[in-house]
Image (cartoon, rainbow, N blue to C red):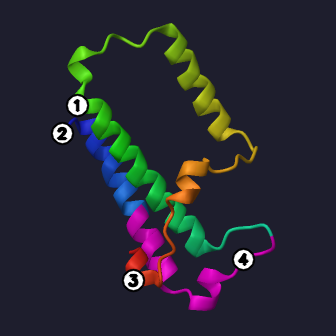
């Protein structure tokens, strides 16, 4: 694996383990508590897992035809820059409808893990 990618992966994995440890200390009530119009911690975690799964499925699909694709070009580069900027601004975005539809309700923290 590329050394830089491996370092990034290890950082993400370390953060995931720390988050899992902190969440493991919460009660069922704390995990499932949500303010009106807000998601609970449990729902947020389920959403993140679903979004990651769907991203990997999409990448695997695109990877199958990678030999037939051309370079994406400057327009796609600009779109990526706009996306990165939008994710760092303090604006809220609704989750894509497809992700919300496919986000399962996990019965407990063990199933979520």
Which residue corresponds to mark 4?
34
For label 2, the crowd category at 10 Å Cα-Cα, with few meaning under 14, some 14 to 19 and many 20 or more, is: few
Residue range of the region highlighted in magenta in the rendering: 16-36
Q: In the rendering, which numbered label is found on residue 3?
A: none
Q: Earlier in the sequence, mark 4 or mark 3?
A: 4
- Which residue sits furthest left? 1
Q: Residue at the location (32% across, 10% down)?
A: 70
Q: Is residue 58 magenta?
A: no
Q: Secondary structure at mark 2?
A: loop
CA gap between label 2 and label 4 equals 40 Å
Which residue corresponds to mark 1?
64
- Work out which quarter of the rendered image holds the C terminus and state it: bottom left
Q: Is 10 placed above or below 36 here? A: above
Which residue corresponds to mark 2?
1
- Work out which quarter of the rendered image holds the N terminus and state it: top left
Q: Is 41 placed above or below 95 here? A: below
Which residue corresponds to mark 3?
110
Q: Secondary structure at mark 4?
A: loop
Left or right placement of residue 92 versus residue 98 in this view: right
Q: Earlier in the sequence, mark 2 or mark 4?
A: 2
Left or right placement of residue 47 versus residue 38 in this view: left
Q: Residue at the location (50% across, 16% down)?
A: 77
Task: Report the front residue among 71 and 102.
Answer: 102
Residue 30, given in percent of the width and then of the height, sits at: 64, 85
Q: Residue at the location (35% across, 59% down)?
A: 13
Q: Nearer the viewer, mark 4 or mark 1?
A: 1
Q: Are circles 2 and 1 on residues that touch, CB within 8 Å?
A: no
CA gap between label 4 and label 1 equals 41 Å
Q: Nearer the viewer, mark 2 or mark 4?
A: 4
Q: Is 48 placed above or below 109 here? A: above
């Amino acid at each position: 694996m590329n050394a830089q990618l491996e370092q990034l992966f290890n950082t993400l994995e370390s953060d995931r383990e720390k988050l899992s440890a902190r969440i493991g200390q919460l009660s069922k009530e704390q995990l499932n508590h949500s303010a009106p119009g807000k998601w609970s911690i449990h729902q947020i975690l389920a959403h993140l897992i679903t979004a990651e799964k769907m991203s990997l499925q999409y990448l695997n699909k695109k990877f199958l035809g990678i030999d037939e694709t051309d370079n994406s070009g400057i327009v796609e580069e600009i779109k990526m820059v706009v996306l990165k900027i939008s994710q760092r601004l303090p604006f809220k975005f609704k989750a894509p409808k497809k992700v919300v539809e496919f986000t399962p309700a996990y019965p407990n923290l063990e199933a979520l893990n």
